[in-house]
């Protein structure tokens, strides 16, 4: 596959986007020991084989590509399946409850982990989300939006409420713990490819991933959630606006400011470890 050019709007935040891919795709496994840590690789040596805007944000003047149409059809079918499960849950179908919770657990845990930076806290919040879902499922209306958006909104509200109760910035305390969650379904975001095999490059990627999580935990909550939903959950601006309850223009502004804040934090962290 030919190497694609990074869109100009992303050039200044290339570190953030690279980190988003690593956070989304690779489990965080700590090095076996200090002596086994390889020499850090410069960020520019990590190749990108593809970088593009989400297919959910196509040029309105052009017809969607066939693969984009297929992705949209698959997404619509998935939302219809989830809506059907929700109806069955309300009818007392225990099997439907299990399928709904099991199918959404990994994604919800991932959102909670990225927001809190703590594996233990993320698991606790995930349990709260599903308890809230159980109590409020009757409020889900397929005519107003997909189940994924509804559940993500519920998750976001619980995370924000929890943050406001604590009134303190959360700094990741779980960088040495393993997080092996993955996003459900095919990813539509930019992809990172490791074309140079070897443990050295793998360890450098893990180190960058840890730095991204550490920096993400220090970003202000309103900017952090926007970056998480866009760059890690691959949601489009309309979905994010619905979840956050703000205009799309505000969403774009928060994402831009969040990426800028992340880039500054990463530069500072990189200087500390060199």
Image: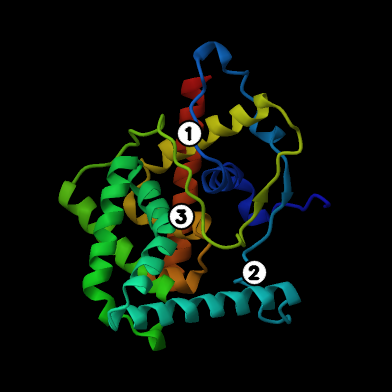
Q: Earlier in the sequence, mark 3 or mark 2?
A: 2
Q: Position of residue 197 (x, y in %)?
A: 74, 31
Furthest toward the left, the residue is 165
Q: Tell me the number on the disc at residue 106.
A: none
Q: As displayed, is residue 8 above or below residue 247?
A: above
Q: Secondary structure at mark 1?
A: helix
Q: Position of residue 214 (x, y in %)?
A: 41, 36
Determine the residue positioned at 39% across, 58% down.
105
For residue 19, what is the image quadrant? top right
Contact between marks 3 and 2 (CB within 8 A): the answer is no
Quick one: label 2, few (<14), some, or many (20+) residues within 10 Å?
some
Q: As displayed, is residue 18 above or below residue 141?
A: above
Q: Tell me the number on the disc at residue 227.
A: 3
Determine the residue positioned at 37% across, 45% down.
219
Considering depth in this image, is 21 or 141 the residue closer to the camera? 141
Considering depth in this image, is 244 or 191 the residue closer to the camera? 191
Considering depth in this image, is 271 or 134 the residue closer to the camera? 134
Determine the residue positioned at 64% across, 48% down.
11
Query: Would residue 256 appear left or right of 202 to someone viewing this image?
Result: left
**Residue under label 2:** 55
Q: Earlier in the sequence, mark 1 or mark 2?
A: 2
Quick one: label 1, few (<14), some, or many (20+) residues within 10 Å?
some
Q: Secondary structure at mark 3?
A: helix
Determine the residue positioned at 71% across, 39% down.
194
- Marks 3/1: CA distance? 16 Å
């Amino acid at each position: 596959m030919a190497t694609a050019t990074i869109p100009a709007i992303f050039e200044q935040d290339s570190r953030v986007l690279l980190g988003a891919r690593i956070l989304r795709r690779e489990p965080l496994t700590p090095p076996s020991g200090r002596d086994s840590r390889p020499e850090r690789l410069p960020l520019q040596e990590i190749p990108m084989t593809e970088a593009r805007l989400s297919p959910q944000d196509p040029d309105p003047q052009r017809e969607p590509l066939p693969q984009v149409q297929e992705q949209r059809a698959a997404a619509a079918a998935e939302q219809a399946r989830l809506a059907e499960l929700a109806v069955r849950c309300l009818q007392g179908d225990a099997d439907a409850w299990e399928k709904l919770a099991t199918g959404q657990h990994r994604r919800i845990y991932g959102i909670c982990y990225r927001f809190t930076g703590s594996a233990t806290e993320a698991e606790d919040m995930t349990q709260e989300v599903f308890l809230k879902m159980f109590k409020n499922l009757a409020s889900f209306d397929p005519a107003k939006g997909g189940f994924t958006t509804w559940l993500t909104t519920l998750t976001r509200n619980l995370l924000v409420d929890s943050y406001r109760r604590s009134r303190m910035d959360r700094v990741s305390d779980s960088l040495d713990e393993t997080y092996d969650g993955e996003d459900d379904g095919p990813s539509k975001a930019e992809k990172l490819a490791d074309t140079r095999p070897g443990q050295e490059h793998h360890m450098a990627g893990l180190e960058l991933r840890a730095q991204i999580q550490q920096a993400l935990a220090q970003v202000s909550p309103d900017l952090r959630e926007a970056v998480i939903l866009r760059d890690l959950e691959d949601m489009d601006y309309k979905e994010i606006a619905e979840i956050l309850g703000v205009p799309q223009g505000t969403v774009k502004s928060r994402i831009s400011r969040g990426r800028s804040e992340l880039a500054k934090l990463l530069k500072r962290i990189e200087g500390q470890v060199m």
